[in-house]
Image: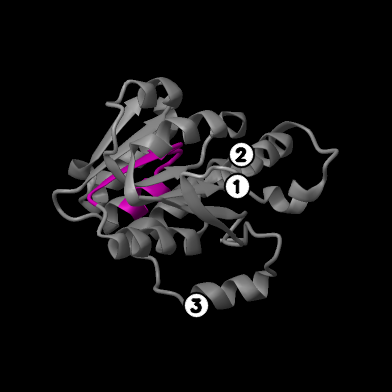
Amino acid sequence: MSPKSFLLSEEMHSYLIEHSTPLDDDRRQLIAETETLGGVSMMQVAPEQSVFLTLLTRALGARRAVEVGTFTGMSSLSIALGLPDDGYLLCCDVSEEWTAMARAAWEKAGVARRIELRIAPALETLQSLPPGPQFDLAFIDADKPGYIGYWEELVPRVTPGGVLLVDNVLQGGRITDASAEGNVAAIRAFNDHAAADSRVELVVLPISDGLTFARKLL
């Protein structure tokens, strides 16, 4: 439960968690299980981000959602908990190993029937979908060089007034380092791309490692 945000101290992060709606036992167990994977567990969305995803899904009245990058299932579990009983979430990932943990968590929480997991390169999965608007909510949290491609496939498929969320857009505070390469450079390019996109209005929020919140225009 250490903060993923470079803006938060351990003390401030604990205060934030203590004054938010608490996580249910299923999510707490998934956090504990994911931590056994070691350093890679930092890819899991932060507790406050999990609560935000559930609340936002409910507030939007979202019925159909999609995520790119499932890992061990915290973000998908959070979104699915906010969907109605007949809601639908499409999850895109390439790892059978990590998503096996996700499948178990979905079953335990009673939301597995709302979720379809496709194991394949996410860009291929998205390109195989019908071209028109079909999702009320989209969440991107995967390989950073792929972000622009995912964005371009998803924006046309999000309903007018729907929301796109994009994770890790501040890169631990390194995003302002113009000399940085790799993932930081990829996210800098994505951030410029999204900010210039006239199809959406957006704000970058300092939640966890930075979260872009975009609304598809009518």
Spot occupied by residue 51 in the image (x, y as percentages of width and height)? 41, 64
Whether residue 213 is visible: no
Q: Magenta segment: does it hold 43?
A: no
Spot occupied by residue 53 in the image (x, y as percentages of width and height)? 40, 58
Position of 136 relative to 19 (above/below): above
- Which of pointers 3 and 1 indicates the residue nearer the eye? 1
Choose between 170 and 9: the one closer to the eye: 170
Residue lying at the far left in this picture: please name it. Answer: 86
Label 3 vs 1, first from the N-terminus: 3
Left or right: where does residue 151 sit relative to residue 80?
A: right
**Residue kind at label 1, given as amino acid type:** Ala
**Residue kind at label 2, given as amino acid type:** His
- Which of pointers 2 and 3 indicates the residue nearer the eye? 2
- Name the residue carrying label 3: 18
Q: In this picture, which residue range is highlighted in magenta?
A: 63-79
CA separation, marks 2 and 1? 6 Å
Left or right: where does residue 195 sit relative to residue 61?
A: right
Mark number, residue 193: 2
Screen quadrant of the N terminus:
bottom right
Mark number, residue 195: 1
Q: Residue at x 70, y 41 (%)?
A: 188
CA separation, marks 3 and 1? 33 Å
Position of 192 relative to 56 (above/below): above
